[in-house]
Image (tube, coloured by chain):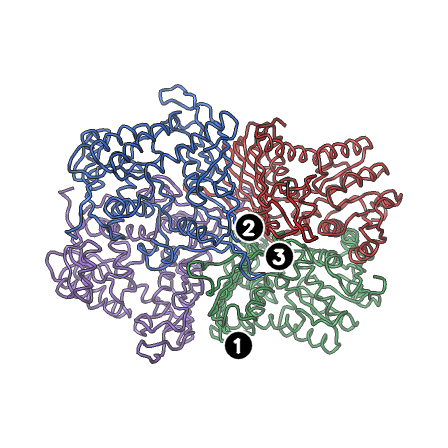
Chain colours: A blue, B red, C green, D purple
Amino acid sequence: MTDKRELRIGLIGSGFMGKAHVFGYATAVKVFDLPARITLHTVADISAEAANRAARALGFAHATDDWRVMVTNPEIDVINITAPNALHKDMALAAIAAGKHVYCEKPLAPTAAEALEMTQAAEAARLKTQVGFNYLCNPMLQLARDMIEAGELGEIRGYRGLHAEDFMVDAQGPWTFRHDPAGGGALADIGSHALATAEFLCGPITRIMGDCVTMIAERPDGYGGRKPVEVDDLARAFLRFASGATGSVEGNWIATGRKMQHDFEVYGTKGALAFSQERFNELHFYSNDDTPGRHGFRRIEAGPAHPPYGNFCVAPGHQIGFNDLKAIEVAGYVNAIVGDAGEPFNFRNGLRIQRLVEAIQQSAREERWLEI
Amino acid sequence: MTDKRELRIGLIGSGFMGKAHVFGYATAVKVFDLPARITLHTVADISAEAANRAARALGFAHATDDWRVMVTNPEIDVINITAPNALHKDMALAAIAAGKHVYCEKPLAPTAAEALEMTQAAEAARLKTQVGFNYLCNPMLQLARDMIEAGELGEIRGYRGLHAEDFMVDAQGPWTFRHDPAGGGALADIGSHALATAEFLCGPITRIMGDCVTMIAERPDGYGGRKPVEVDDLARAFLRFASGATGSVEGNWIATGRKMQHDFEVYGTKGALAFSQERFNELHFYSNDDTPGRHGFRRIEAGPAHPPYGNFCVAPGHQIGFNDLKAIEVAGYVNAIVGDAGEPFNFRNGLRIQRLVEAIQQSAREERWLEI
Amino acid sequence: MTDKRELRIGLIGSGFMGKAHVFGYATAVKVFDLPARITLHTVADISAEAANRAARALGFAHATDDWRVMVTNPEIDVINITAPNALHKDMALAAIAAGKHVYCEKPLAPTAAEALEMTQAAEAARLKTQVGFNYLCNPMLQLARDMIEAGELGEIRGYRGLHAEDFMVDAQGPWTFRHDPAGGGALADIGSHALATAEFLCGPITRIMGDCVTMIAERPDGYGGRKPVEVDDLARAFLRFASGATGSVEGNWIATGRKMQHDFEVYGTKGALAFSQERFNELHFYSNDDTPGRHGFRRIEAGPAHPPYGNFCVAPGHQIGFNDLKAIEVAGYVNAIVGDAGEPFNFRNGLRIQRLVEAIQQSAREERWLEI
Amino acid sequence: MTDKRELRIGLIGSGFMGKAHVFGYATAVKVFDLPARITLHTVADISAEAANRAARALGFAHATDDWRVMVTNPEIDVINITAPNALHKDMALAAIAAGKHVYCEKPLAPTAAEALEMTQAAEAARLKTQVGFNYLCNPMLQLARDMIEAGELGEIRGYRGLHAEDFMVDAQGPWTFRHDPAGGGALADIGSHALATAEFLCGPITRIMGDCVTMIAERPDGYGGRKPVEVDDLARAFLRFASGATGSVEGNWIATGRKMQHDFEVYGTKGALAFSQERFNELHFYSNDDTPGRHGFRRIEAGPAHPPYGNFCVAPGHQIGFNDLKAIEVAGYVNAIVGDAGEPFNFRNGLRIQRLVEAIQQSAREERWLEI
């Protein structure tokens, strides 16, 4: 163990996603045989108090309220960015300039232009990057992709994807950074997951027709007034894939009752898959090859046959959780930095999603199909 | 009983839908207190032999291979048309000219123009008409509509509808009348159900953007050759409703593994509904008004509280079947002819669906949004 | 058609089950190619008024308040008994004495002794009998049995059966004939269905250990007082099958929230089946023979591959309803009377269930295992 | 952080459950604000090589092949026992004698007599103990218990519990320690979970009737021969609770296709709950108080309203995994050792389960009801 290289982590932000990163590291070092030791070096937050509290709670050795100082600290190898969207670019560019690997939460940046700048900087510096599209780390999504690639569904013809939640359903909920036209909206925030899954499974999207809708036109501004909302509350798109398949996606944060409806169905000439993140340890598979009279969607439960589930549990059916997805994400990234594995989902992949998001937004505004 | 008016039925076609009509009548007369006696007078089919066989099997007193004669028979009151789509107009116009009420399977006609002609003829003659959108007859759909109208979901914001089956998934399946550009295609054939349900629940659609896709470009012509297919195998649309809600629908007959995925989700400010025809005796309801920590989609099972379920069974949970939906459809129509009930889904309603179908097709061709 | 033999029906009782019989006949004559014409001759009920009303509503030619007269009417061939349990024996014996075939609702009689008397009378008279265990008529139950017999599950090892509803959950619900110690109780009333299904699938039960529980010790007597309840509100049993398999069943009419939980799971050396009457057009099948990593319970939807579903609908996934089960039951009986088919579930089968019920009751009282 | 007390862990065994303990600690220290620092001090395994490998993989500072030495090490505070069942007693007694707190995997011991000895030793020494009934740590089980205690279901009448898996379904699978009559069998191994959940929800069981079945009479002994199996492959019991409710449980390790069917249904006078560990982030709740026509089992998804879910994720619907249950278990134990919280499930609780298991086994052998 002692001969392993050390990766020292600097984390910016300690909210929902900051915690998820830490939980991911904590689990990953136990569950996987990582090629590096992980040290939680410093956490940066908006105040010294918040940072200190986070350091204590999450187990970082140091705390700071100045991320700019942290990203240049020579004792740190990797910068994890979980601050709001609008800050991603400055943080990432500073970290890259200081020679750090950067692991950034999604969306990568408010605009594709910024995401491109970040991507090019990282590539020029030959640093390893990661964007947190954690749902892709699910063994059942990997299984779905493997099955598609192996031809178990035949040629893919149709795709229907979705990411719907209801956390913005209350019109009295306040205006937040997620409503900022620069990078905000349901499509950028969660519809982006649906796009990532669509390409993860079916390959590149080549053409797109978007439909973006604002249903709640203004929200309390937190100062007793109201602020107009210009971003979409729900967005839809028709898709064309390079493979010849066609599909659709929806991103929706006013889907009353839905907490995690990251779902898809994919139809091929020989079989089909259906999946819901609401029960993400299951994949439903229909095969035309089944015996007549015995056809049906079968509910495959996650188990050791679906790597890396077996790292978490040797027995099937026990189920992994959301934070375990993050551990898988972390492990993939560490292997990319230290080992010779490819980056699972790097800035260029994140940029790609950003471009798709913007294409859908532009398509919706201009009411016409766009080539990607 | 004897003092009831008699309705004498002439049926054209004795296939899937012809049988369903007869099963519907047989059940309706027992289950409902219909205001008329039903007599199965004559069945017409493509040959005398087929017609005779159908008469024996289904219980018609007479059989004929000439529907033109039948529709003018003064002993017949109602003409049921279950022949292929392309023949609907001639049959309906002839029946209307002879003063018959007409009950026509969907789609009403290959084109909206023809459907309009049929509608105007029926209205001018003050005859009662019906088009067979049987899924709307489900007590759980009626419940969904009642709940929406009563405001149990609050203001409706989003809708997602679907009708997907897989009966055309095999590229070696032969070219049939369903592939005829005049009125064929997945959208017209089954996507029309999704459109009917969308308007049934959310009211008029005002604007539409379509996406129609042909995945199987040619099919065996039955004579050893191949015939090009120009109709859609799957179609999608973005929707705007007069209410301010937005939505989407899909019609798809190459959805491998799906037998009857006539599904929808509808999201309001206060609640949501989810439904699948795969389990059509259930409606899933989420209410924001539930106690905190006790929220969840609840699975409402069809029962006597959901008319007219109670006519079929006094106990909840026993379930009605597809043919029972047809019996409800029949009963509604008989009440419209004889009683003073409105027509549940008349030619004008059928015309409406036809227009929506054509608007989606045109929108897809022209790649632009269309007003309805 | 005219050369078919006629079967003239006399029905006793016109409540829930009386109606279900009539709906069953109405559908059966259309859906199946029955070897006989069915005539609804006479309905008997407790008053002339009730009987007349039923005749009008259900389509019987005659009505009577004297079932004793009806059962001797030479114009009637078959007597359908849907009156309360306690009356079954007298009615059936009178009908048998008059040479009628008898179709009796379950349970066959309050006691096995009475059921035996009825069975012997019918057998001595060489008349065809039927007891209404309608859930067995489900194509998916037939599929389950066929799969077991064909060895698709391997050797059967374990069985878990259930019939739970909640119609007696309210302690203020009045005392009814279902609470009469002579033949009443949850086990006799609905647990009997679970027993019938258990033997239908796994063959004869040879040994039994019962547990019968009265949870609601008294109920309103309808006259302002209260009446003690001695029958079981829920009953359980351990089972041994002649095959070597073991199992359990439960009958429960105070299962809050359950409307039709007639469920089972059956486990074999090679596969398993899971079923719920709550979704009775589905059967869930697990096969060890599936490809590794692709195992899972598959949801088989009822379709034409599962006779006699195809008689109701040529397309899969459309679903049959409860009254359709009754139509299948009717058809089986008509074929047994007129054709050369065996009786699907005759008095001897009904007697068998009665014996199992009594054995469980006795076992529960004596707190010991009993041989059957 | 530095002022926190340190708890130094010695782990015996590094298989499935040993790993789960370590994963539990790793997550617990991040997710919860534990009142102690956790140090993974030493891992003991059957060989020095295995122990060293485990220490490296799991992050222990030391390794040993002699657990007897480890348990007396003054640098260690807590001994975690995840070795086979038969060794639990010696290990625990030695650890207790050395003044260590003991956290033992279930079942606590092969016999209740041994479990009693262990319990008494721990209690006499005033040490804190824990037995690993991890399924009880699920927030949704805690919710179920809270709802029952708060009277949301009314008075509990009926219970149906189950723990079924299929890992012993193959008759060619070898004889293992789980088949040892001393403490082995499906009931002791996994049925014990069903018993723990039954009492967790419904309180003490007072009377029991058992049914234990051996279906696979012999298994390969690993040396080319075959060894008889005397333990149960599946076991059932009828239950009486002190509360007046009645119920049943089943433990089954030959339930083909089932990977984690730890399920229950509980019926009260006012409501009901249904749960399956196959989807353990959900609890299904039926309330009689719902509006007529809107009744139904509602699917409550785990969220921050169900502690301690919120420690893992601030958003509902994201789901926790099996290892997270272990983290909750760990946290409860640490709080009991260091803080003033009660022991969540101590040796006395483990002894209780052992007694229930033995009572069922004895009842099955003697074929009679037993008081507990």
Mark 2 Cα-neighbour bin, 10 Å: few <14, some 14–19, many ≥20: many
Tell me if residue D67 can be seen: no
Query: In the image shown, does A338 or B65 lie closer to the viewer?
Result: A338
**Quarter occupied by residue B76:** top right
Question: To which residue does mark 1 refer?
Answer: C242
Query: Residue lying farthest bottom?
Result: D225
Q: How many marks?
A: 3
Residue A286 is left or right of residue D187, and the answer is right
Indicate the amino acid at tag 1.
Answer: Ala
Chain of residue at mark 1: C
Question: To which residue does mark 2 refer?
Answer: B256
CA gap between label 3 and label 1 equals: 32 Å
Expressed as whole percent of the image width and height from the top left, the position of residue D226 reads 35, 79
Q: Nearer the viewer, mark 1 or mark 2?
A: 2
Indicate the amino acid at tag 2.
Answer: Thr
Give the SS element for disc 3: loop
CA gap between label 2 and label 3 equals: 15 Å
Residue D79 against residue B245 in the figure, above or below? below
Mark 3 Cα-neighbour bin, 10 Å: few <14, some 14–19, many ≥20: many
Tell if the residue under mark 3 belongs to the same chain as the one under mark 1.
yes
**Quarter in which the N terminus of chain D is drawn:** top left
Residue A21 against residue B369 in the figure, above or below? below
Residue at 76% x, 63% y is: C34
**Quarter in which the C terminus of chain D is drawn:** bottom left
Question: To which residue does mark 3 refer?
Answer: C303
CA gap between label 1 and label 2 equals: 42 Å
